[in-house]
Image (spheres, rainbow, N blue to C red):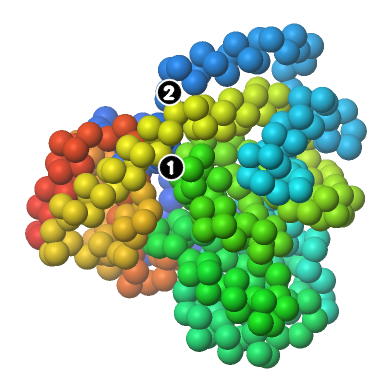
Amino acid sequence: MRMSIQKRLEKELTRLSQQNAYRKLPRPTEGLDFCSNDYLGLAKNKSLQTIIQKEFSSQNLSHNGATGSRLLSGNNEYYEATECCMANYFEDESALLLNSGYMANIALLSSVPNRRDTIIYDQACHASIKDGIRLSQARHTPFKHNDLNDLHRKLKQASGNIFIMVESIYSMLGDCCPLAEIVSLAQQFDAEIILDEAHSTGIYGQHGQGLAHSMELHDHIFARIFTFGKAIGSHGAAILGSNQLIKYLINKARPFIYTTALPLHSVVSIRCGLNFISEHPSLLNQLWKNMEIFNKNKPNTLNIGNSARSPIQSITIPTNESVQMASQEINNLGYQVLPIRSPTVPKGQECIRICLHADHTKQQLIGLLEALQKVTASI
């Protein structure tokens, strides 16, 4: 007998609850923010808020929203001018704004590779990348996380146009991809690299142009995805690449074609945020200083991953139940952290994810480390 859809949903929710994998929307809590992706503190920066509001007011808008997709009624001169500014800022030929990093990955991967091509992706890549790959209908295979030997083996087996999909900084582990070596392998096998710069946007390079730019490798990347809801403190994303790529996406990328455009306020916020970072290099310097303080003072007893070059720090605490209990205890001590549970990460790799910010003080960083040590010692 067929189970009703409501009973099926209830059964699955019960299963998730029994496995400590049930999700619910959290409410803001008291304590220092060590859980958000607001790496430079721009989402709450009062000076930037004033600049955004002034710029937004100067546009004399007649609409609150975009009113349609970019190909219908949602395009305007400010949108196009911002994309030109992005192309100059990130030093590429063209840029295309999209509504989120998730949508950018779906748009690019579902439209460019086809069923005759091969996508080889790091197994630690974000869910949006894996979803986009499935939609592409291309042959695809993962390689072991940051394992160049495994990537080399998979490249030898690939056919058609070959795409290597990696992230500059991985969102859960906080470690960097070996980009220089990947570029070398791509050249050896005539493969194209797609680089998700979500967690390096605004952080790497003199003005936050990302990991590839900081290594002077951006000219060797087929496409870069930058997101603006993290270090930039706003919302939205952009794909950077050749003029031909951007024209192709405008014509073929369904998530772009059939989605209402970002409201102009978001576009203004992105543009002002990028300018603000350029004009305030001390923000990047302070973030890197805080990363150094954290890594210099972390005790050896803490099982912290290899992420010295990233504001993302993760402490492995196996099992969903244990990591939830640990994060709650740390929150009770005044530090906002979140548990990352399976299936978001593989079983046995559950962790507390910590995000360092430019506006954290040394005292706050040391206090967090002491709280982490105290709680993890009792597990």
For marks 1 and 2, the one nearer the N-term is 1
The foreground one among 75 and 77 is 77
Q: Quadrant of the C terminus?
A: bottom left
Q: Nearer the viewer, mark 1 or mark 2?
A: 2
Label ID, residue 223: none
Q: Position of residue 314 (x, y in %)?
A: 31, 58
Say what amino acid the circle numbered 1 marks. Asn
Residue 342 sits in quarter: bottom left
**Seen in the image, is 54 located left or right of residue 283?**
right
Q: Position of residue 103 (x, y in %)?
A: 68, 49
128 lies above or below 96: below
The foreground one among 162 and 98 is 162
Q: Position of residue 201 (x, y in %)?
A: 53, 46
Residue beneath disc 2 = 45
Q: Residues within 10 Å of mark 2 (few under 14, many from 20)?
A: few
| Residue 235 in sight here | yes
Q: Quadrant of the N terminus?
A: bottom right
Secondary structure at badge 2 equals loop
Say what amino acid the circle numbered 2 marks. Asn
Residue 348 sits in quarter: bottom left
Secondary structure at badge 1 equals loop
Which residue shows up at 72% across the image and 17% down it? Answer: 64
Which residue shows up at 78% across the image and 76% down it? Answer: 161
343 lies above or below 335: below
| Residue 320 in sight here | no
Q: Position of residue 110 (x, y in %)?
A: 76, 62
Q: Residues within 10 Å of mark 1 (few under 14, many from 20)?
A: many
Please say if the residues under marks 1 and 2 sit with CB atoms less than 8 Å apart: no
Label ID, residue 37: 1
